[in-house]
Image: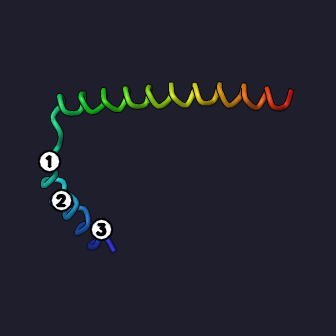
């Protein structure tokens, strides 16, 4: 059992050495894009929520 675990961990290390990690600049840029998109979608959904709430309130009144 421990032999298989040791083999697994050594294979994981080999595979992690093959990974191309992004630079700090790439990571910051990607994070910025994600934050902007999340803000835009949140704003859009907030407007839709308000409009639908008012529509439902108008229908039920």
1 or 2: tag closer to the N-terminus: 2
Locate residue 57 relative to residue 4 in the image: left or right: right
Residue most extreme to the front: 59
Relative to 11, say whether 1 is above or below: below
| Quadrant housing residue 53 | top right
Whole-Å distance between the Cαs marked 3 and 2?
Answer: 15 Å
Question: In the picture, which quadrant includes the C terminus?
Answer: top right
Q: Nearer the viewer, mark 1 or mark 2?
A: 1
Query: Dot 2 corresponds to which residue?
Result: 15
**Disc on the earlier residue, 3 or 1:** 3
The CA span between labels 1 and 2 is 11 Å
Please state the horizontal and vertical placement of residue 24, each as a whole percent of the image.
Answer: 18, 30
Closer to the camera in the image, 21 or 11: 21
Evaluate if marks 3 and 1 touch, with contact meaning CB atoms under 8 Å apart. no
> Circle 2 sits in a helix, a strand or a loop, which is it?
helix
Quadrant occupied by the N terminus: bottom left
Q: Residue furthest right?
A: 61
Q: Which residue is mark 3?
A: 5
The mark lying in front, picked from 3 and 1, is 1
Q: Position of residue 23 (x, y in %)?
A: 15, 34
The numbered disc on residue 47 is none
Task: Give the numbered dot on residue 20.
Answer: 1
- Where does residue 42 sit, x and y in percent of width and height? 50, 29
For label 3, the SS is helix
Secondary-structure class at tag 1: loop
Tag in front: 3 or 2: 2
Label 2 environment density (alpha carbons within 10 Å; few <14, some 14–19, many ≥20): few
How far apart in space, not on screen, are marks 3 and 1 (Cα)? 25 Å
């Amino acid at each position: 059992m421990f032999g298989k675990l040791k083999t697994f961990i050594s294979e994981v290390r080999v595979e992690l050495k093959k990974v191309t990690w992004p630079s700090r600049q790439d990571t910051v840029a990607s994070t910025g894009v994600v934050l902007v998109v999340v803000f835009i979608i949140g704003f859009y959904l907030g407007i839709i929520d308000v409009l639908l709430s008012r529509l439902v309130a108008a229908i039920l009144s």
